[in-house]
Amino acid sequence: MLHRHLIPSVPLVISLFFAAICLAAAQEAPKDPVIIGAPAGAKIKKPKVAFPHAKHAALQCEACHHMLKKNPEVYSCSSEGCHDLATPTSSEERKSIAYFRNAFHANSKASCNGCHKSRKKEGKSAGPTACKGCHTVK
C-alpha cells in the first residue's frame, strides 16, 4: 500500500533534485573577469572594466544582482529595464539609477564605487575607487 503512494512521487523527487542542481550551477559566478561596457547608444570616454567575480565571491549575488530573485534570467546591468539608460537628457535622468553610470559610480553601497568607498571607510579590504583602478580594458 505504501509503495502505491511512494512510486508516483519518485519522478517528482528526482526532478526537484536536478532542478536544484541546475539552479545552483546557473547562479555560480564566472571564474574569469567579465568585461563591463555601456549599453547600446552610450558614449563612453574611459576604457571598459574587467570585473573580477572571483574577488567578490564572499558577497551575496543579490548585493549587485538586485533583480536576481524577481527575474533570474537577467544578469547584465545594461539589460532592458535595469540600468539601460544610455544618454540622459535631463538632470533628473542623470541622477536616476536607470542611468547605467550610476549603477557603478553612485555614492551608495549598491554601486561598485560606493561599496568600495564604504568598505575603505570601515577599514575593510576594498577595491579601487579611482577611475584608473577599474577602467583598464582598451
Image (cartoon, rainbow, N blue to C red):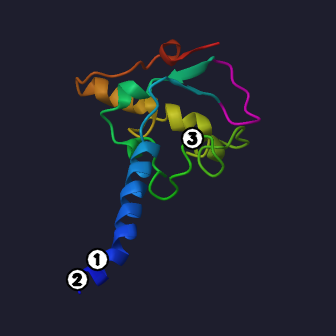
The range drawn in magenta is 38-46
Magenta stretch holds residue 91 = no
The quadrant of the rendering that contains the C terminus is: top right
Q: Position of residue 124 (x, y in %)?
A: 24, 24
- Please identify the residue farthest to the right as the structure is shown: 41
- The percent coordinates of residue 89 (x first, y second) are 73, 42
Say which residue appears at 45% left-offset and 49% top-offset: 66
Q: Are marks 3 and 2 in contact (CB under 8 Å)?
A: no
Tell me which label, 1 or 3, sits earlier in the chain.
1
Quick one: label 3, few (<14), some, or many (20+) residues within 10 Å? many
* Residue at the spot of label 3: 77
**Residue highlighted by disc 1:** 6
Residue occupied by mark 2: 2
Between the residue at mark 3 and the residue at mark 2, the CA separation in whole angstroms equals: 51 Å
Residue 31's quadrant in the figure?
Answer: top left
Q: Secondary structure at mark 1?
A: helix
Above or below for 43 versus 135: below
